[in-house]
Image (tube, helix red, strand yellow):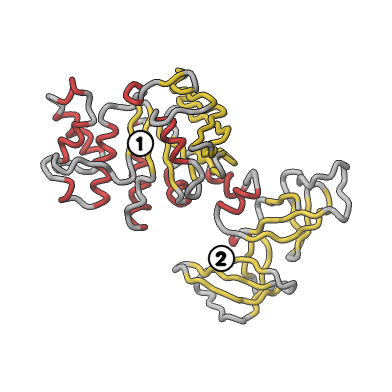
Amino acid sequence: MALLEIESVRHDYGGHPVVDGLGLSLAEGDLGCLLGASGCGKTTVLRLVAGFERPAAGEIRLDGRLVASPACHVPPEHRRIGMVFQDYALFPHLSVGDNVAFGLPAARRRGGDARVAELLDLVGLAGQARRFPHELSGGQQQRVALARALAPAPRLLLLDEPFSNLDVELRERLSLEVREILKRTGTTAVLVTHDQHEAFAMADVIGVMNAGRIEQWDSAYNLYHRPASRFVADFIGQGVFLRGEVLDRNSVRVELGRLESDVPLDCGASCASCGRDCRMQVLLRPDDVVHDDTSPVVAEVVAKAFRGAEFLYTLRLPSGRTVLSLVPSHHNHAIGERIGIRLDVDHVVAFRE
């Protein structure tokens, strides 16, 4: 059953549409993510769900109950929604324990020591109740903010770029830990971020946003291997597009060889069999291009980036076009060297030219 439903929501700032006909459905217990570049409208969606903004059109439902529309506005305090902010928003004059207790309803704050201790233990801060926020690291402060948001057992938790102030290594580790905490408590949550790795690590379902709309609401695997639009294909991961000639409904030829697709290619032709003049743009990811010394197809190394276990090579094809290839780092080729490559494509991603 869907806990959060957003249908055709629109919101403007000064006549400029920031959210434009957006819709999504999030099942109870799932972790959703709105992923996109700055200015795409993702934080505004969070504010609409929380009740800090009112939609100009559309509806928002929680547990089947209408909480927002042009004619209906349930106040934030009556929506049973928790919020974790980008800057943690902890009270510096309150201890860690008092910060967590602040999230409890007033009637439960007195005598709430057991609940506070339970939550601090849950987020890995057992025994830290008497410390103050300035005595904690950034990662620890974020855990306190999470504990405070979970204190009243919200039906839905909203996280607004919660790890953006942390260094990369801590961000990756904490995102996995927060996912485990939310799954353990059965909390339904929506995360907003511009970081793909963060989205992939935390979310069950991800919405790629563009100009106030969701281009695709799907799993991380499908966003990468089965993007629904050229925008999603460009935004998620890395890759380049090569021109391809459609041979039939399930095969296309690019400069590096013939590719077989497990789904029909939508080249726009109305005939049952495509003609030879039908062209498509075919996406090749770095993991689609495999280094193979025995291959008759060779390419020139024009750039390389060392990534520890792998090199990311930029390779120039005979046509002058370039592709990317991930190669184990013990294959250390020099700039200007020519190496053999072949295609190993599991999912053909192609769009009309």
In the picture, the disc for residue 56 is none
> Badge 2 is on which residue?
326
Residue 3 position in % (x across, y down): 45, 25
Say if residue 296 shows up in the picture: no
Q: Residues within 10 Å of mark 1 (few under 14, many from 20)?
A: many
Q: Residue at x 53, y 45 (%)?
A: 220
Residue 158 position in % (x across, y down): 38, 35
Q: Is residue 68 above or below residue 271?
A: above
Q: Residues within 10 Å of mark 2 (few under 14, many from 20)?
A: many
Q: Secondary structure at mark 2?
A: strand
Q: Secondary structure at mark 1?
A: helix
Of residues 331 and 315, the one nearer the viewer is 315
Q: CA distance from mark 1 to mark 2?
A: 34 Å
Residue type at the position of mark 1: Leu
Q: Is residue 333 above or below residue 225?
A: below
Total count of labels:
2
> Badge 1 is on which residue?
182
Residue type at the position of mark 2: Leu
Q: Is residue 351 above or below residue 5?
A: below
